[in-house]
């Protein structure tokens, strides 16, 4: 007997199973909500295909020529099959003068699933969880975990392999970890949040397995360890405007499991407390944090320890919310047990100020000397990029010790047809690498970028004009300066189906106060879209460098492409 309800449930069950398998095959991690899967499941749209093809040819010429071929081509195609409006199966092929490549769904080295239903979330695979910065703090593990958040409660449990066994191989010099024991870990967290208070605790137990390695790497300082880390946190709100918070953690770390009677066990503590007063549009608070020297948990990759922080912060809004200010200042002490000769006193702080007196004007300033990691690049790396197919490195991060910025913008209109935008920005980034209380020659880096720009948009003519003046200073082993203007033009034709963009720039470079180069760039792009699916594009770059102490260079690059998407 035909039962529509049974058929519908069967289809949904099969789709859920296929989705789990498909996502495990096609990507490294996926979050799934069972309610959304039922909602998005579609028998009518059980199969969809989308993708495109692209043909591209490039011409490159340079003097001097560094061996790059003058003509290159690329033929590519990609298609994605979507099943039941839930599962994606992507395929792609690329053919160029350098070779042939292809990609299809396959099992990745690492994968994770995060299915959830209402207040239940399950984590399976290669995952990471965070309980506290003093216990389990984002360490990746292979295993499973579950988060439960009913009403005012938060509960969590995890178990898995924190570290796989790696045998020592003297011929393998590429790895940063020469050897390590297999390490398993289990943890749990429980917290209750009320309207006026919260209280919680979490625990992590991690252990290395001595028999996981055939050769014992004691000579490398690698020994089987065991760790029990526990954290307690609590907070309360008094009189609706005063908030007290505190956190205490301790860690028992056994640095060598083979030592009899646990004589290698070390005990460490961490403590953090704060009080904040919130009223109307401002808040003020003070905080204290202390972390014992050598405090370690096997649930985190890295710890800042042997420090004591005293901080104060203020945040407020003024002038009917048009101006805001947030300030945090404090001092940091290290060498708490005075085991070393020197004890550093470091002032830490950050400030952010913004003001928008009207809809047309906005101003902002910011500064911080907290240690952060950012991608630091000169703006002229982009202005002087002559290879339009090159992807500039944006994944290299530098540890910054000082970071400051300023921005000012003003927008105004001249009649109903013209919109103007005037902008000024500046940023200063300083990184310092200390080694044994000294700064090496290449350890201090300074990068200062600034620019003044103006743009005007003529609405009826679909025309945009822009101009800018840029300056960059960088200091490492030598002092370098770059400065110069840029002009841009963009115009649309045929109801914006035809777009033309072009730019001109010229900049001069100095090294140690000596002019050593002048660089001129011209680039243009013409793009036409036909019937929404076909796109034709022609782009080119010409660059000339006059070098006063070296050979002049000339580069030109042109690319013609056609793309069809469906």
Image (tube, grey):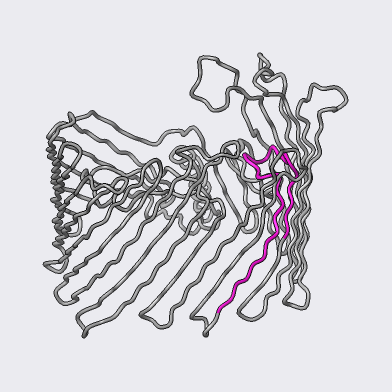
User: Whole-percent x and y of residue 17?
Assistant: 52, 43
Q: Position of residue 223 (x, y in %)?
A: 71, 24
Q: Quadrant of residue 505?
A: bottom left
Q: Is residue 53 visible?
A: no
Quarter where residue 504 is shown:
bottom left
- Residue in view at x 45 percent, y 53 percent: 429
Q: Which of 45 and 437 lies nearest the eye of the viewer?
A: 437
Looking at the rendered structure, the number of numbered marks drawn on it comes to 0
Image-based side of 438 in relation to 68, left or right? right
Residue 309 falls within the magenta-colored stretch: yes
Residue 56 % position (x, y): 16, 42
Say which residue appears at 27% left-offset and 48% top-offset: 510
At a point 68% along the width and 20% down the height, the residue shown is 212
84 sits to left or right of 566: right
Q: Is residue 237 left or right of residue 475?
A: right
Relative to 115, residue 173 above or below: above
Q: Is residue 68 visible?
A: yes
Front-most of 131 and 30? 131
Q: Which residues are magenta?
A: 288-317
Tell me: 503 left or right of 240.
left
Q: Residue furthest right?
A: 261
Rendering coords of residue 431 (x, y %):
48, 47
Q: Is residue 485 magenta?
A: no
């Amino acid at each position: 007997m035909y039962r529509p309800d049974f058929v519908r449930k069967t289809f949904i069950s099969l789709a859920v199973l296929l989705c789990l398998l498909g996502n495990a095959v096609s990507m490294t991690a996926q979050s799934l909500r069972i309610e959304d899967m039922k909602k998005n499941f579609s028998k009518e749209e059980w199969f969809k295909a989308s993708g495109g093809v692209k043909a591209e040819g490039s011409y490159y010429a340079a003097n001097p020529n560094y061996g790059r071929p003058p003509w290159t081509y690329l033929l590519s195609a990609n298609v994605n099959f979507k099943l039941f409006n839930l599962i994606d199966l992507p395929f792609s092929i690329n053919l160029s003068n350098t070779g042939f490549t292809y990609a299809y769904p396959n099992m990745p080295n690492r994968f994770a699933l995060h299915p959830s239903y209402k207040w239940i979330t399950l984590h399976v695979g290669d995952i990471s969880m965070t309980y506290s910065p003093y216990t389990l703090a984002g360490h990746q593990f292979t295993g499973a975990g579950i988060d439960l958040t009913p009403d005012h409660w938060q509960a969590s449990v995890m178990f898995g392999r924190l570290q796989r066994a790696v045998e020592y191989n003297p011929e393998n010099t590429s790895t940063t970890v020469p050897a390590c024991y297999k390490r398993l870990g289990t943890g749990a967290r429980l917290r209750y949040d009320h309207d006026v208070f919260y209280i919680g605790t979490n625990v992590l137990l991690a252990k290395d397995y001595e028999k996981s390695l055939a050769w014992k790497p004691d000579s490398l300082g690698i020994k089987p360890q065991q760790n029990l880390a526990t954290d307690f946190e609590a907070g309360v709100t008094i009189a609706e405007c005063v908030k007290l918070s505190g956190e205490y953690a301790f860690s028992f770390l056994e640095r060598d499991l083979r030592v009899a009677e646990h004589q290698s066990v070390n005990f460490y503590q961490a403590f953090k407390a704060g009080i904040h007063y919130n009223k109307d549009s401002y808040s003020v608070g003070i905080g204290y944090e202390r972390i014992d020297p050598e405090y370690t948990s096997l649930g985190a990759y890295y710890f800042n320890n042997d420090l004591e922080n005293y901080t104060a912060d203020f945040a407020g809004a003024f002038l009917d919310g048009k101006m805001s200010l947030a300030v945090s200042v404090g001092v940091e002490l290290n060498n708490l047990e005075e085991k070393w000769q020197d004890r550093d006193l470091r002032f830490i702080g950050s400030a952010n100020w913004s003001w928008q007196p009207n809809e047309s004007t906005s101003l902002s300033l910011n500064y911080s000397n907290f240690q952060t990691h950012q991608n630091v690049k000169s703006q002229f790396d982009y202005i002087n990029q002559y290879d339009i197919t090159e992807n500039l490195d944006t994944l290299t991060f530098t540890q910054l010790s000082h970071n400051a910025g300023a921005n000012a913008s003003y927008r105004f209109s001249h009649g109903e047809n013209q919109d103007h935008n005037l902008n000024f920005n500046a940023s200063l980034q300083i990184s310092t690498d200390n080694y044994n209380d000294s700064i090496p020659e290449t350890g201090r880096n300074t990068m200062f970028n600034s620019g003044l720009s103006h743009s005007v948009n003529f609405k009826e003519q679909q025309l945009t004009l822009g101009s800018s003046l840029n300056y960059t200073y960088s200091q490492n082993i030598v002092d370098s300066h770059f400065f110069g203007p840029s002009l841009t033009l963009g115009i649309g034709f045929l109801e914006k189906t035809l777009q033309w963009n072009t730019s001109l720039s010229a900049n001069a470079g100095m090294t140690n106060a000596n002019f050593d180069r002048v660089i001129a760039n011209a680039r243009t792009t013409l793009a036409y879209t036909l019937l929404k699916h076909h796109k034709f594009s022609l782009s080119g770059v010409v660059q000339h460098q006059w070098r006063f102490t070296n050979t002049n260079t000339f580069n030109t690059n042109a690319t013609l492409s056609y793309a069809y998407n469906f």
